[in-house]
Image (cartoon, rainbow, N blue to C red):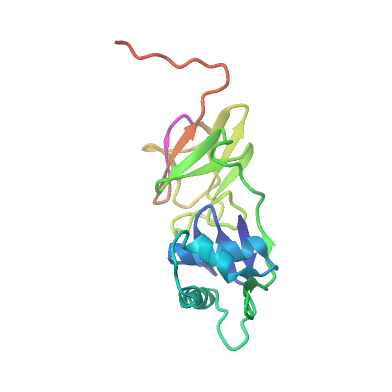
Amino acid sequence: MKVRFGDCVFDSDMRQLQRGASAIDLPPKTLVLLEALLEQRPRPVSKQDLQDRLWPDTFVSESSLARLVAELRHAVGDEGSEPRLIRTVHRFGYAFAGEAQALAPARPTPADASAWLRWRDRDYPLAEGDNLLGRGDDCAVTLPSGKVSRRHARIRVAEGEAVLEDLGSKNGTYVGDRRVEGPTALAGDEIRLGSVVFVFRARPAAGSTETAAER
């Protein structure tokens, strides 16, 4: 899920909240709270449901949830006597009340994807067709780095093959130590965009046979 609201963009796959041009460093539970409210918008979510999601099998007081809500409001600029984005529903819970826009279609799950990128110990599935990489809101994988261009590179997945192209980025796109100068086929390669390093992975094509190691 990737959603824009106000001057913020939330990307659940990247576990990232961006406000303006800056990435906001939020604790994991605060990001989960925002995700839960955005998923159910504009319907309110009960305090009990939020506590079960944030602290499963653990008893916490309502003040713990209230502190997370206050932290989230501060991060998205929704402070004051009458919050516009995160509404308190008296004696029930909270609701996301601001206008929000989904920015990109849902990407395939890692289990369904034929190709994906691994970054920071997480897998980011690639859809069939074009997958943009960069800082822009319309990118399939959004990278919060000043050394990455808004539309830095593209990976095109089609018929079991993946091809990487640089899109005229300032700091270049690399496969291993080699700068990408044209369309480049990928096969388990390390990819670098600016200072961000991924590893590309793909499933064997249907019907292919893996080579057995000699004993």
Q: Residue furthest bottom?
A: 81
Seen in the picture, residue 166 relative to 57 is either above or below; the reply is above
Where does the image place residue 185, in percent across and percent down from the top left?
51, 30
Seen in the picture, residue 16 relative to 62 is either above or below; the reply is above
Residue drawn at point x = 61 percent, y = 57 percent = 2
Q: Inspect this view and state whether residue 9 appears.
A: no
Residue 206 within the segment the image draws in magenta: no
Residue drawn at point x = 51 percent, y = 24 percent = 204
Quadrant housing residue 192: top left
Seen in the picture, residue 153 relative to 160 is either above or below; the reply is below
Q: Nearer the viewer, residue 132 or 149?
A: 132
Q: Residue furthest top?
A: 215
Residue drawn at point x = 38 percent, y = 36 percent = 176
Where does the image place residue 18, in percent across and percent down from the top left?
52, 65
Q: Quadrant of the N terminus?
A: bottom right
Where does the image place residue 171, in percent across and percent down from the top left?
44, 51
Q: Nearer the viewer, residue 22 or 169?
A: 22
Q: Inspect this view and state whether residue 153 appears.
A: yes
The span shown in magenta is: 186-192
Seen in the picture, residue 211 relative to 187 is either above or below; the reply is above
Quadrant housing residue 36: bottom right
